[in-house]
Amino acid sequence: MPWYPWVMPKLLAVTGARRKLLVLVAVTVIVAGALWWFNRAEPALPVAGECIKGPSVTTLKIVYCGSAGARYVVLGRVGNLPEEDARAVSITCAQWPDTTLVTWRERSGGKGVVICMRDA
């Protein structure tokens, strides 16, 4: 598209009611975006019996247990633990002795949910 130098002054000449309307629309879009960002739902955490797609557990994508992508089966969850306590697998997942993988997902206040899993 060719550059027309005489168009720019006309675009910058927006005054009065038009300028107020543009500012109002811009502020509304920014506020709406900020509200959406801070109030978006957290991803659902898997519960006991659900399966997770592999090869990593960073996304924790829940899949049908009969599918080829199911790599881990969730044995259970332990909630409201700080990350340091989540690393003690023998303590947090002791009630599920066949646990082979433990992951921790932060929630509020530095505490989170420990998810105990085994290979599918």
Image (cartoon, rainbow, N blue to C red):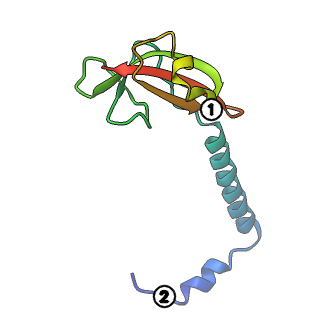
* Residue 54, x across and y down, in percent: 33, 32
Count neighbours of disc 1 (C-alpha within 10 A) and say few if under 14, some if 14 to 19, many if 20 or more.
few
Side of 53 where 38 appears, left or right? right
The quarter of the image holding the N terminus is: bottom left
Which residue is found at the position 65% from the left and 37% from the top?
Answer: 39
Q: Which mark is residue 4?
A: 2
Of callouts 2 and 1, which one flags the residue occurring earlier in the amino acid sequence? Answer: 2
Residue sitting at x 54%, y 30%: 104
Q: Is residue 50 left or right of residue 79?
A: left
Q: Are marks 2 and 1 in contact (CB under 8 Å)?
A: no
The residue that label 1 is drawn on is 84
Kind of element beneath mark 2: loop
> What kind of residue is marked 2?
Tyr
The quarter of the image holding the C terminus is: top left
User: Residues under labels 2 and 1: Cα distance?
Assistant: 62 Å
Nearer to the camera, 67 or 104: 104
Q: Residue 31's x, y, as percent?
A: 69, 50
Q: Residue at x 32, y 36 (%)?
A: 55
Instruction: Give how far across and how far down residue 117 sits, in percent.
Output: 42, 21
- Choose between 16 and 94: the one closer to the eye: 94
Nearer to the camera, 108 or 72: 72
- Relative height, residue 32 to residue 27 (above, below): above
